[in-house]
Amino acid sequence: MAAAEQLSGLSGQADRVFKLQESGTNVKREVLAGLTTFVSMAYILFVNPQILGEAGMDKGAVFTATALSAIIGSLLMAFLANYPIAIAPGLGDNAFFTYSVVIAMGISWQTAMAGVVVASVIFMVITLFKIREYIIDAIPHDLKLAMAAGIGLFIAFVGLQGGGLIVASKSTLVQMGSLTVPTTWLTIFGLIVTGALMAKKVNGAIFIGMIATTILGLVTKLISLPSHLISVAPSMKPTFGVGIQHLGDINQPQLWAVVLIFLLVAFFDTAGTLIGLAEQAGFMKNGKMPRVGQALMADSISMMAGSVMGTTPTAAYVESSAGIAMGGKTGLTSLVVGVMFGFSMLFSPLLTVVTTQVTAPVLIIVGVLMASSLSKIDWGRFEVALPSFLTIIAMPLTYNIAYGIAFGFLVYPLTMLAAGRRKEIHPAMYALFFVFIILLYVINILPK
């Protein structure tokens, strides 16, 4: 009897905080939605350390930073904005950090993390003064779609490469990898299983696919068993505060260009996802998203916290759509996601079994999802098609997200002017045109 009264009290409290009845939902539905969202996005706990580990960062520390930033972001989204939208480090941002900044530009991960800290501070300021919405509105819709698709192709390319399906070639730059390599078949297996689950619309398909691939690797002894399954979360000492300690390194135009790209990628990552999820959930009113300021602030604070702890920028997760589809309508869904990330911190030993071949199918599948925005670009108008295409194709071919964005922003004003559509170009786009000319100069001309 006492237990029943306690549950009833908790339910009533949840209703008051998250306005469940007003939103047409209940505790059971919100909890189920939260669990569904968590299972759908839990892969980031293992994929993020894998990607940032390639930049030289400590995987254990990144695992803990990933979980904590997801907890902070999801709880802020729950209590500040009351939306069923989860936040965690974004795949596009960590790919840019590792492959474009650290590997391609030769910048140390410590200095690159300082760039993330600076971008986080600027992000917070422009969110507070609502400049973020102004800049988002200035960027043409087609270029926003092209950026998402380009990052998707880039991520998929990284997955194909990491999984051994694509390898380097002196004569053709790239070629198909050898099918005689046993670990490559792990990638193929994971891709087939995850793809089939996605086609069947199974909730948590990506996470289940990772588990299936890992089990196959363990059974075939292509992956070694961990010494134990549960342990205290790894220390963040190797990464905590490193970005702040290296703020003095941000003293070159080249590094400010990196900060700018972090800002742009993070800008569109969350903004586009928020609007898309709000449309799906039916939150939009007169074409606008209520409490968007609070949602953006939740993202900004979690990005700042993540940069201090040692992870790349956070973003609203499109996988939240799985929870919304299960009936999630309030911040209680996000609260459940945050709690689940807390429990997940006990399973860091599993990092050793999540190899590149296990995460490769995830990157390829997420690339497919991001590339879906290709269908919404206005390919019928060449003045739009050319800058969009250059944005998309340049990212994987130059192995640099920054170049893709720069190509699109440089060509768009020129083609629009040539087409006689001068009045449709936002004044901010002219400013960005010169910003990206400088960006390309400092990336390529100044010494690394």
Image (cartoon, rainbow, N blue to C red):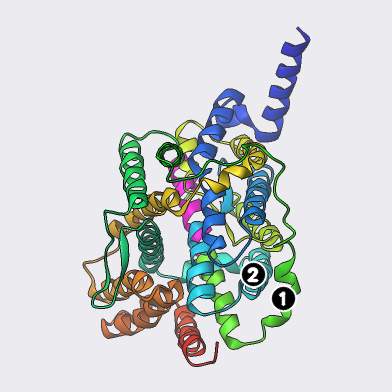
Q: Position of residue 86 (x, y in %)?
A: 57, 45
| Residue ranking furthest to the top | 1
Q: Quadrant of the N terminus?
A: top right
Q: Is residue 235 above or below residue 32?
A: below
Is residue 174 on the magenta stretch? no
Q: Which residues are magenta?
A: 268-285
| Residue ranking furthest to the right | 2
User: Residue shown at 50%/60% (left/top)?
Assistant: 269
Report which residue position mark 1 lands on.
246
Relative horizontal placement of residue 232, taking residue 267 as reference (left or right): right
Q: Is residue 84 visible?
A: yes
Q: Position of residue 172 (x, y in %)?
A: 24, 75
Q: Is residue 282 visible?
A: no
Q: Amino acid at mark 2?
A: Met
Q: Which of the pair 213/404 is nearer the observer?
A: 213
Report which residue position mark 2 lands on.
113
Relative horizontal placement of residue 127, taking residue 167 as reference (left or right): right
Q: Which of the pair 332/3 is nearer the observer?
A: 3
Is the residue marked by circle 2 packed among few (<14), some (14-19), or many (20+) residues within 10 Å? many
Picture mark count? 2
Q: Secondary structure at mark 1?
A: loop
